[in-house]
Image: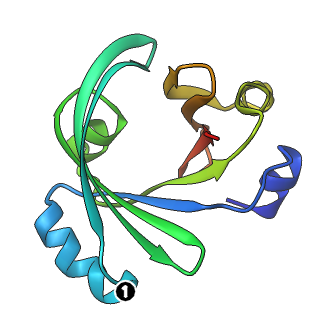
Amino acid sequence: MSNDLQEQLDLPPIDQIGFVVPDMDAAIKLYEPLFGPFSMMDSPIEGANFRGQIKDCHLLLAFGKSGDMEIELIAPLGGEGPHQEFVDAGGNGMHHLRYRVSDHDDKVKAAASIGFETLWTMRMGVDIAFTYMQRDGVPLIIEFLQMP
């Protein structure tokens, strides 16, 4: 992700790097020496929009820190979503960069105006929303998260 893109979309600094892994136990052993201990969370997700269709998925999440940067490990456990799609395609490793924003909908529109497509999105109540977006030529997914 170039600084040009950050400037073009008026983005804050990246606050999370997400890694998708097929085996959480193996990933913890691999990444813990780099990032320290992780806290785990079971996360069933219902009603997210994945590639234009409402899909449920089940994820095992692990969170660590490197300074102010959050490190997220994601192991898909079932259902349909971008993480399972990544693993099914042979992926294992860095997957997305997250930007915590206060104007989620505006960021999604701005990214769409320069060729990004929505991959996965969900709104939880009035104040919480996330969207994964991707564009040809950009090697990672970008995530916008709005959360008070």
On the image, numbered disc 1 is attached to which residue? 34
Label 1: which secondary element = helix
- Of all residues, the one furthest to the top in this rendering is 53
- Of all residues, the one furthest to the bottom in this rendering is 33
Q: Quadrant of residue 15?
A: bottom right
Seen at 46% across and 74% down, the residue is: 65
Question: Quick one: 140 or 57, which is closer to the camera?
Answer: 57
Question: Quick one: 56 or 91, which is closer to the camera?
Answer: 56
Q: Is residue 62 above or below residue 9?
A: below
Picture coordinates of residue 107, whole percent (x, y): 76, 33
Q: Is residue 56 above or below residue 129?
A: above
Left or right: residue 52 compared with residue 67:
left
Picture coordinates of residue 28, whole percent (x, y): 21, 73
Q: Quadrant of residue 101?
A: top right
Picture coordinates of residue 72, whole percent (x, y): 39, 60
Structural crowding at the residue carrying mark 1, measured as other residues with C-alpha within 10 Å and reported as few (<14), some (14–19) or many (≥20) = few
Seen at 34% across and 84% down, the residue is: 36
The answer to whether residue 67 shows anywhere in this view is yes
Display colour scheme: rainbow
The answer to whether residue 139 shows anywhere in this view is no
Q: Amino acid at mark 1?
A: Leu
Left or right: residue 95 compared with residue 73:
right
Seen at 32% across and 30% down, the residue is: 81
The quarter of the rendered structure image containing the N terminus is bottom right
Q: Is residue 58 above or below residue 20?
A: above
